[in-house]
Image: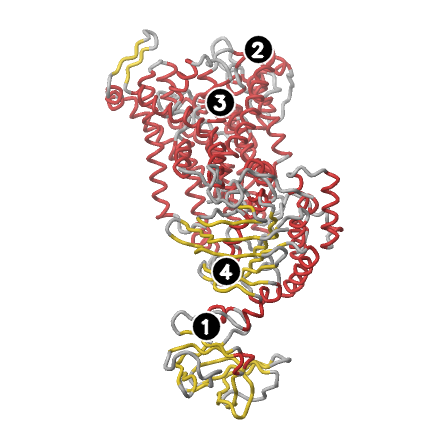
Amino acid sequence: MAEVTLSNVRKSYGAVDIIHGVDLEIRDGEFVVLVGPSGCGKSTLLRMVAGLETITGGDIKIGGRVVNDLDPKDRDIAMVFQNYALYPHMTVATNMGFSLEHRGTSKAEITERVKWAADILGLSHLLDRYPRQLSGGQRQRVAMGRAIVRDPQVFLFDEPLSNLDAKLRVVMRGEIKGLHQKLKTTTVYVTHDQVEAMTMADKIVVLSGGKVEQIGAPLDLYDRPANQFVAGFIGSPAMNFLSGTITPQGFAAPGIVLPLPDATLGSLQRKAIYGIRPEHFVLDDEGVPAEIVLVEPMGSETQVTMKLGETLVTGVFRERVSLSPGATIRVRPDLASIHIFAAEGGQRLN
Amino acid sequence: MVVAQDHAVPEGRSSSPFWTIARRDSLAGFLFIAPQLVGISIFVLIPLGLVFWYSLHEWNVLANTFTYTGAQNYRMLIEDTNLLEVLGATAVFSSGLVIFNLSLALLLAVLLNQKLAGISIFRTLFFSPVVVSLVAWTIVWGFLLQKNGGINGLLQVFGVEGPNWLREETTAMISVIVVQVFKNVGLNMILFLAALQGVPNELYEAARIDGAPRFKQFRRITLPLISPTILLTSIITIVGSLQVFAQIAVLTQGGPGLSTTVLVYYLYQQAFQFHFFGYGSTLSILLFVIVAVLTFAQWQMRKRIVFYES
Amino acid sequence: MKADLSPRMKTCLYGLMCVLLVPFVFPTWWMVTSSVKPISDIFAFPPQLVPQNYDWTTYTKVFELQPFVQQYWNSAYIAAVVTIGTMIVSSMAGYAFARIRFPFANTIFMIVLLGLLIPSEVTIVPLFQMFLQAGMVNTHWPLILVPIFGAPSVFSTFVMRQFFVTLPTELEEAARVDGLGRFKIFRKIALPLAKPALASVAIFTFLHSWNLFLEPIVFLSSAEKFTLPQALTQYTDAYGGPMWNIQLAAATLTALPVLIVFIIAQKQFVEGLAHTGLKG
């Protein structure tokens, strides 16, 4: 097991920069999730750690060793691929033991390691099957088994759950997390799904356009997003944004004035973005008026699309709202959970 | 447990060693292609240069002289009255072969694409001449096409007096084309069959719902969709037809007269029977130019005739 | 096209196919049956579709008139060596062109593809001179070296490249992480998965070598060096006319083994061929 350090890591194809100077410290045993929209460079970054992509600048260290020009095989890492990448012409057991064959491990030890990994993942009865005879979830487990037999310093996961259906994804999410708690191996996990990131990570790295937007624990990112991008990316349903101006009376958005969390905030008359999560609206007769556009009852909660001034926003209420579109309710933003961002650049202001 | 191998990379320093991952991979790439590249250089590129060099020389094997004569061989090419006949025969042979081969291949492929019991037996039988030794196939056809051979024998049973196939100009040409087509049409047939099976069935279902009759479905859906295969097979077949040698050598030796002397056979005669290596090389250059021009022309046609490319 | 056919239509199609089958099947039948007919029955009228009299001495004469066993062996071993050699050379080159990034890869690929444009007939004169200089005329070297390394293998390289291009990159990346170098990835992952493409390359190459005619008659001059296609044409009488029944017996011996192998393995043959990436 080892820590992984990226310092000023860059990647460019010709004149096009894909990764702009990423710095990242991953502690020994940590579960780090790289998350971001497609094309943000998260997979490229992971593949650079794996050694499948060359790096243009900076250093990558695994366990204190600079690995910039080492082949993947010499980095002591294991990787789980998006499409599993199981060798179609080998049985499950051979697939899992394949990496050991090439490291001079004895036959007896390979068998033992494969058996150990198969036991952990519940694959013992499938060892003689071929990949084409397995279901999606079983293939996923074999791919993980192939990674853990070697007991590498670092596990790398590249969107491993994206080919599974929604139900199985939740199951496998739990299994991967459970595996990490059992083995405590440093893990870097790439996903575009912020729910996966929130539920699995010790630490989340939000990437966008080849830059790190924010690094932090899941709830820190949720509670105090550093900028509008992170605020919009983390959380589901997504945070509502209203653009407007900060005034002495409050936040002036088109057609409505919203209360601000604290009066001394920044300079007055500044253009800004007012961010509020759907769950941070409270039904309150003293609140601001909101015209209901759409009501979606989910059972445990109710999701309401409503017009706040001229802006459409989403609210989620624990109460059952039995109103129909066209009616007006009064809602109050929870002032402790309001996020104010600069109109230019989207940096957090409060 | 597995221990990471020790590597001579200094700790904490980021200067790259010379053998980076990319460089090692490049080396691997060159090693992988080396046998092919060296082989092409020795057995294709150098001979191609030499054949051009020879074509500029008068080469007398018996007197062992090799003198530079510039464009003289090429002037001879233009003045060679036989050559006109040879090129004519080559053109008739190649175009006849391609047309007959492709249409028969397409017909057979369409037949084999039907839902019929035992169709794979037919497929096997239509394909079987491809694996029969070429010269064996040619010999048996030569035997069948004799004046008193099997074909005329069968015709006579029906009271028809057959010609002496290989000794009359027109029938000799038809014979060599037919023998070659039946030998190799199975290859194109299989390629067409694969292409036909690649046409999504929904398209035919949609066309049936639209009320298009069968022949129209074929013309408006099947043909456009398999046009890339038609183009490819026609290139392969044309270039292949220019290389046909054994059949001519065994069946007609280029005769009667020059009627079946195609360019390759003429080249062989000039170089290896009459030992005109210089002029033979000039004919080689001519063959190369014809192949290159035809391939290029068909490639250009791709944009016009190929409606669809996956 | 795929609609169910009426019974009448089916009968028509069967009939049409049976008629079309005649020129494909009859020659082989005629070759085999005529090879055991006595010379007097060879041109008998009406033609004997089934031999009335048998003369098996034609087959012993095949071996008496020429070193036919030696010639058979020549063809077989040359075809085998060429097939294996081509599979190695073209799978390696095809793999590199499909999968390895190295400088000038595209330019080199174009140069190699030039081989498709240059029929071996174009270069036969200089090749003859080169092998003459090297003292290799009337040896089997030209028939082995040129097909493996020269223009004929380019087609195989192209087929292999087309196949390797479709192989998922993830598999190779997994292998790299699993500790394999380039050569081992090629041998342990790419090559085992390329069996269908390799099979069609093997079939094409074998048939090409087995059928080679111009090259043997240019390069070989003594009967014990001859290959089968060349040997078949040598069964002639004192006036140069063919000894038909003996020639047909030799042709039968040449054609039948390959034909039998084909009928046994026809599924692999035909399907391998259809998957050469030539579908366009």
Q: Which residue is mark 1?
A: A348
Q: Are marks 4 and 2 on the same chain?
A: no
Q: Secondary structure at mark 3?
A: helix
Image mark for residue B208: 4
Mark 3 touching mark 2, by CB under 8 A?
Answer: no
Q: Would you place residue B46 above or below residue B20 in this image?
A: above
Q: Amino acid at mark 3?
A: Leu
Q: Secondary structure at mark 1?
A: loop
- State which tag comes first along the sequence, 3 or 2: 2
For residue A258, what is the image quadrant?
Answer: bottom left
Q: Secondary structure at mark 4?
A: helix
Q: Which residue is mark 2?
A: C65
**Between marks 2 and 1, how big is the CA–CA gap?**
99 Å
- Residue B15, percent across and down? 46, 42
Query: Would you say residue B123 is visible in this rendering?
Result: no
The disc numbered 1 marks a residue on which chain? A
Q: Amino acid at mark 4?
A: Arg
Q: Amino acid at mark 2?
A: Leu
Q: C141 and C8: which one is in front?
A: C141
C107 left or right of B181?
A: left
